[in-house]
Image: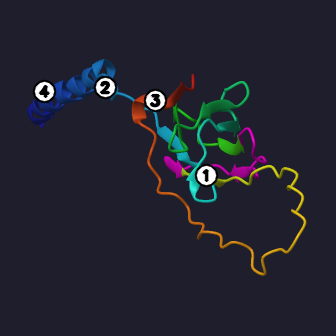
Amino acid sequence: MKKAGTWIAGIIGPIIVGYVVWLITRTPPPPPPPAVTTFEGMVYSGSAPVAKAMVAVDLSGTAGVNGPVHDFTDDNGAYRIVFTGLPSDAGATLNVTANGYKAAASKLLASPLQNNIHVDFPLDPVMTVAPQPVPGPQPLHPPEQGVVHMPVYVPKIASKAVRIQIPH
């Protein structure tokens, strides 16, 4: 019986020692890459894109960014802001302003944010004083206005996106 116990200990002992050495010396798996969150969309008025509109993304939670991050729309009215490493508790408020237009209503996005966020903003032009009617007979019907439709979305080129790395 003593011989069998020694024989079993001789087999199990090296296995246990090998497992302990493996636990101590193994390298942990690499951390997953940080999440990428993209805010993109279009700013338009009527049927036309609005170039050079300022889009501001103001993060809430523990995102670690001091103040809003800004991007300006391209000639197609497109904007793109890419964040890497946003914490899961981050929310966002998007605001848009442009010269000659009323500011768009803020859009509030609660946490957790999706990876790809697409938000379009319609803007209304600032009203100017209408010209005084010309004296004399007026037409019975005002001139026909064209059908207003949202312009086709052309994404901003990825290389022109604003990129922000959130420190951990």
What type is the residue that disc 2 sits on?
Leu
Tag 3 residue: 160
Instruction: Report, in whole angstroms, how far the alpha carbon at label 1 lies from the one at label 4.
Output: 78 Å
Whichever of callouts 4 and 3 sits on the residue coming sooner in the sequence is 4
Q: Nearer the viewer, residue 53 or 95?
A: 53
Whichever of callouts 1 and 4 sits on the residue coming sooner in the sequence is 4
Residue 36: give x, y in percent of width and height.
47, 37
- Quarter of the figure that contains the C terminus: top right
Q: Nearer the viewer, residue 157 or 127?
A: 127
Whichever of callouts 4 and 2 sits on the residue coming sooner in the sequence is 4
Residue 61: give x, y in percent of width and height.
71, 38
Residue 119 in view, yes or no? no
- Quarter of the figure that contains the N terminus: top left
Picture disc at residue 10: 4
Residue depicted at x 59% and y 36% = 87
Whichever of callouts 3 and 2 sits on the residue coming sooner in the sequence is 2
Instruction: Report, in whole angstroms, how far the alpha carbon at label 4 lies from the one at label 2.
Output: 21 Å
Tag 1 residue: 44
> Mark 4 or mark 2: which is in front?
2
Secondary structure under tag 4 reads: helix
What type is the residue that disc 1 sits on?
Tyr
Residue stretch in magenta: 97-117
**Disc 4 packing (10 Å; few <14; some 14–19; many ≥20):** few
